[in-house]
Image (spheres, rainbow, N blue to C red):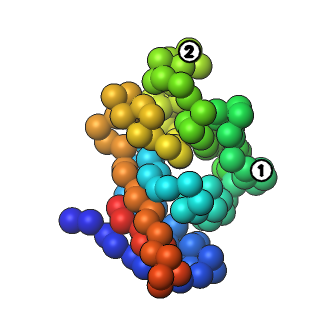
């Protein structure tokens, strides 16, 4: 069963992030789908706030992956796969060490590496309704 939530304000993102994390309490790999400008990074910032990240959360556009520390000392790995030319590039950075670490992995542009996504990855779709000026989150 999918959860579908309409969002009309950035102020609602923390609540939606909490709903996502509560819906999948054992989930550790989250794949975020959406067009450019849909709000993937902004939503990931809200998730990181819910997970008590103490570092500054920014898109790892050029670095491919950023690592953030949580208040409990565990790590979150934030991937931006937009600039990958092929999924093989993810092999070069040792993606398995991240994906199978037991830490949270938050992936933007996962469609670039579909064949490497673990079966248990939680897929989150963010669609934009320009007429209603809303975002629709489906997970």
Residue 55: numbered disc: 1
* Residue 58: x %, y % from top left: 73, 50
Q: CA distance from mark 2 to mark 1?
A: 26 Å
Give the quarter of the figure containing the C terminus: bottom left
Task: Name above or below for residue 82 compared with residue 97.
Answer: below
Nearer-the-camera pick, 134 or 108: 134
Sequence-earlier tag: 2 or 1: 1
Residue contact at pointers 2 and 1, CB within 8 angstroms: no
Front residue of 72/57: it is 57
Residue 96: % across, % down: 47, 23
Q: Between label 2 and label 1, give the one nearer the viewer.
A: 2
Looking at the rendered structure, the secondary structure element under dot 1 is loop
Task: Kindly indicate the quadrant of the structure image that contains residue 63.
Answer: top right
The residue that label 2 is drawn on is 92
Q: Residue furthest top?
A: 92
Q: Is residue 56 visible?
A: yes
Q: Residue 50: which quarter of the image?
A: bottom right
SS for tag 2? helix
Badge 1: residue crowd in 10 Å (few <14, some 14–19, many ≥20): few
The answer to whether residue 47 shows anywhere in this view is no
Q: Residues within 10 Å of mark 2 (few under 14, many from 20)?
A: few
Q: Residue at x 55, y 36 (%)?
A: 81
Q: How many marks?
A: 2
Q: Residue at x 36, y 34 (%)?
A: 114
Q: Position of residue 18 (x, y in %)?
A: 50, 69
Q: Could you tell me residue 47's position as x and y percent?
A: 58, 61
Judging depth in this view, the residue of 40 and 129 nearest the camera is 129
Q: Residue at x 62, y 55 (%)?
A: 41
Q: Residue at x 57, y 73 (%)?
A: 13
């Amino acid at each position: 069963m999918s959860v579908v939530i309409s969002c009309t304000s950035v102020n609602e993102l923390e609540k939606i992030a909490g709903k996502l994390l509560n819906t999948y309490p054992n989930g550790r790999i989250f794949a975020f789908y959406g067009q450019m400008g849909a709000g993937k990074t902004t939503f990931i910032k809200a998730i990181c706030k819910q997970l008590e990240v103490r570092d500054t959360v920014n898109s790892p556009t050029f670095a491919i992956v950023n690592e953030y520390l949580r208040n409990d000392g565990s790590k979150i790995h934030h991937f931006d796969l937009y600039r990958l030319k092929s999924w093989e590039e993810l092999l070069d950075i040792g993606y398995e060490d991240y994906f199978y670490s037991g830490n949270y992995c938050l992936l933007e542009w996962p469609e670039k590496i579909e064949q490497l996504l673990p079966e248990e990855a939680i897929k989150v779709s963010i669609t934009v309704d320009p007429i209603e000026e809303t975002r629709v989150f489906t997970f």
